[in-house]
Amino acid sequence: MEKGKVTLSVIKADVGGFVGHSSMHPSLLERAKEMLSAEKEKEFLIDYYVTHCGDDLELVLTHKWGAENEKVHKLAWDIFMACTKVAKDLKLYAAGQDLLTDAFSGTIKGMGPGVAEMEIAERASEPVIILMADKTSPGAWNLPLFKIFADPFNTAGLVIDPKIHEGFHFEVLDIVENRTIELACPEEMYDLLVLIGAIGRYIIKAIFRKGDHEIAAVASTQRLNLMAGKYVGKDDPIAIIRSQSGFPAVGEVLEPFAHPHLVEGWMRGSHHGPLMPVSFTQATPTRFDGPPRVIACGFQLNRGRLVGPRDLFEDLSFDGARKLANEIAEYLRRHGPFQPHRLHLEEMEYTTMPEVMARLKGRFKS
Ligand code: 13P
Ligand code: 13P
Ligand code: MG
Ligand code: MG
């Protein structure tokens, strides 16, 4: 904890779906709010906001305790456990889905939930955007984060704003070797793209402004960190992005989502689909459990208080992206069980391959 600084922690988990994996029962949101309201009253938290994206429960917390604080993580863990109990009582679907262990052990990292945190000295005005997605995986942020912080055709400020003209540093996690590397843009852009174009292996973890190394963005990569070295499946991701005055403008942060790019994680975590930007009320993936969704919560921080959120994809300027996403979804669905709609063999969350191969053994001729 640093004096005068505020920490923004976004922690999420799927603790039970309503109905199936499509959305969240209101009683889970209520339980989480009750518990957070008590912590705000005790002044352990400055402020909080609770929402959901599809079946994922999203906790937005502000406090003075710094990133990776044991008490803050324990609070989130306790909320997920309490909400799992509510989900179990209602026999909701896959109650406790993302909680990989029974007991808390100092940090929520590696226990199943996703975490994105940053400790910052609040600027004179501090607009932040929190992205939350369902039916996809952390690699889904690579393309939009690249566009926001490195593509001059997306972010005009990289060309015409002296405050960001120098560019940004990208911290990238290699999930197979469990190691990170920092690359500078624009000068190492092509090297960066060789890595982050491979969304199943290299994931953008954080972005820093060149010069003062001020944190600009963080994304959740926890489960991937934990089980590096073997394929770990999907984990619906979150990201925090700072905006304006020395960072990309709000419209530059949202612009990449006007193009519904293909991501992994639709239906049984085993299909590609377009990432559809939607309003809070449309974050309910239903067609073939999708297509994958992303919502954007905009806040102005005010001494740690969360002024907001604004539902940033509610705007009609994203109607075209939604229409296109539905057309892409329709086109991909016609492929049924064939790649590239179905994911590559190694990346499917569900497979019958071992059983089928065992049964067919002996019938292959060479
Ligand atoms: P700032 O330089 O204050 O971030 O303003 C940029 C802007 O909002 C233009 O759209
Ligand atoms: P979630 O990862 O959002 O729980 O979705 C699981 C699934 O298999 C949907 O088809
Ligand atoms: Mg689920
Ligand atoms: Mg989910």
Image (tube, grey):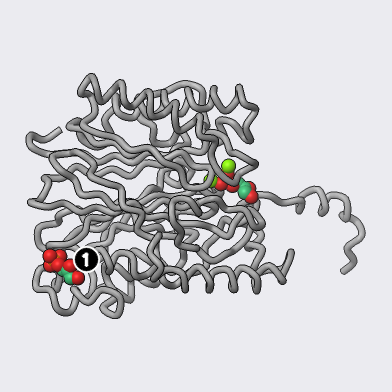
Residue at horizontal 81 percent and vertical 48 percent from the top: 355
Please state the total of marks drawn on the protein image. 1
Residue at horizontal 92 percent and vertical 60 percent from the top: 363
Quadrant where the image shows the N terminus: top left
The residue indicated by pointer 1 is: 249
Q: Secondary structure at mark 1?
A: loop
Using a 10 Å C-alpha cutoff, classify the residue at mark 1 as few (fewer than 14 neighbours), some (14 to 19) or many (20 or more): some
Q: Is residue 148 left or right of residue 236?
A: left
Q: Is residue 219 left or right of residue 161?
A: right
**Which quadrant of the render holds ligand 3?**
top right
Kind of residue indicated by mark 1: Ala
**Can you give x and y, in whole percent of width and height, for residue 286 in the image?**
62, 53
Q: Nearer the viewer, residue 326 or 61?
A: 326
Which image quarter: residue 11?
Answer: top left
Q: Nearer the viewer, residue 272 or 181?
A: 272
Residue at horizontal 16 percent and vertical 45 percent from the top: 120
Which residue ends up furthest to the front in the rendered image? 316
**Can you give x and y, in whole percent of width and height, for residue 119 in the image?**
19, 42
Q: Is residue 23 above or below residue 173?
A: above
Quadrant where the image shows the C terminus: bottom right
Which image quarter: residue 202?
Answer: bottom left
Q: Is residue 149 above or below residue 76?
A: below
**Can you give x and y, in whole percent of width and height, for residue 204 in the image?**
35, 58
**Can you give x and y, in whole percent of width and height, for residue 89 in the image?**
61, 22
**Residue 176 seen in the current view:** no
Residue at horizontal 12 percent and vertical 62 percent from the top: 245
**Residue 13 seen in the current view:** yes
Is label 1 within 8 A of ligand 1 (CB to nearest ligand atom)?
yes
